Amino acid sequence: MALNPYQSYNNASVMTASPGELTLMLYNGAIRFLKQAKTAIEQEDASQAHHFMTKGQDIIRELMATLKPEYEIGANLFNLYEFMLRHLLQATLKKDPAMVQDVIELCEELRNTWGEALKLTRTQNPAVVANK
């Protein structure tokens, strides 16, 4: 099956992104899917809520898999991601969009912090960007 231009662009973006940019893309994807899950819960569309919630949880699991737990920051993020997954499970069981919003806000904070770190890395060491 042929990819549409949007899919082709997305595939090229992923294939050429640095590890830091990929992490940023993961956060953006989690936020997008969790917002869609929240909307589906509010509209009482259980099928769509489950679909988007699963996609959001899968991304959080992928973020967990990228961590290096031997470092303190990795271990702390792992615990935060575990909390997020448990919170989303409870949100699903309770059909509570506010609980999904809690996780969205955590993801947004992490994404924004990660984005700032990428900007600092680029401005402080342009050779890193050139050799990605």
Image: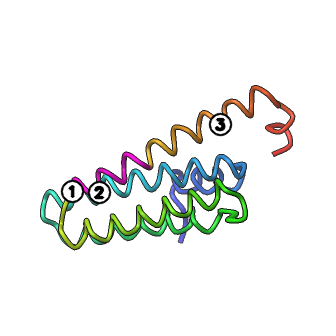
Amino acid identity at mark 2? Val
- Circle 3: residue type: Ala
Residue 87 visible? The answer is yes
Q: Please, what secondary structure does the residue beneath circle 2 have?
A: helix
Residue to which mark 2 is pinned? 100
Residue density around tag 2, few if under 14, some if 14–19, many if 20 or more, within 10 Å: many
N-terminal of the pair, mark 3 or mark 1, is 1
Q: What stretch is highlighted in magenta?
A: 98-106
Q: In this view, does 125 lie to the left or right of 115?
A: right
Circle nearer the N terminus (3, 2) = 2
104 falls in the magenta region = yes
Image quadrant in which you'd find residue 56: bottom left
Residue designated by label 3:
117
Compare residues 35 and 86 and report the one nearer the observer: 86
Q: Residue visible at 18% across and 66% down? A: 95
Q: Nearer the viewer, residue 7 or 45?
A: 45
Residue in the image at 71% along x and 58% along y: 71
Give the Cα distance between marks 2 and 1. 5 Å
Within 10 angstroms of label 3, few (less than 14), some, or many (20 or more) residues?
Answer: few
Percent across and percent down for residue 3 are 54, 62
Farthest residue toward the left? Answer: 44
In space, the residues marked 3 and 2 are separated at their CA atoms by: 26 Å
